[in-house]
Image (cartoon, helix red, strand yellow):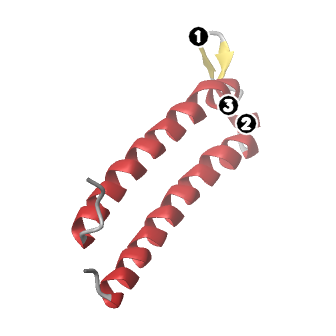
Amino acid sequence: MITKEKLQDYWRENRRLMMIVLLVWALVSYGAALISGILNKIVIFGFPLGYYMGSQGALIVFLLLIIFYARRMDEIDRKYGVEED
């Protein structure tokens, strides 16, 4: 049985992880759009970097965020004894 203190610690760590993931998501989503003028001066394979970041780069970062979040949450779940069977 999980104690109230351990449950509060679990949710504190969970919220911290979510805030980190959301911060990275926001920076990638909005940061690239805000600096797209600068990024478009760089060309990769004939495409401006701003276009590439919007069409490919952001998707790769989002996929990596999902993988990171899932693995880290598994670790946190095991740490507090609330993992799924």
| Residue that mark 2 sits on | 36
Q: Is residue 12 left or right of residue 79?
A: right
In the rendered image, the vertical position of residue 14 relative to residue 41, given as above or below? below
Q: Is residue 25 left or right of residue 20?
A: right
Mark 1: secondary structure: loop
Q: Position of residue 37 (x, y in %)?
A: 76, 35
Q: Is residue 60 left or right of residue 8?
A: right
**Image disc number at residue 45:** 1
Spatial CA span between label 3 and label 2 = 9 Å
Q: Dot 3, crowdedness within 10 Å: few (<14), some or many (≥20)?
A: some
Residue drawn 26% across and 72% down? 80
Q: Dot 2, crowdedness within 10 Å: few (<14), some or many (≥20)?
A: some
Three-letter amino acid code at the position of disc 3: Gly
In the rendered image, the vertical position of residue 52 relative to residue 63, given as above or below? above
Q: Are the two marked residues, 3 and 1, in contact with CB atoms closer than 8 angstroms? A: no
Q: Are the two marked residues, 3 and 2, in contact with CB atoms closer than 8 angstroms? A: yes
In the rendered image, the vertical position of residue 28 relative to residue 7, given as above or below? above
| Residue that mark 3 sits on | 54
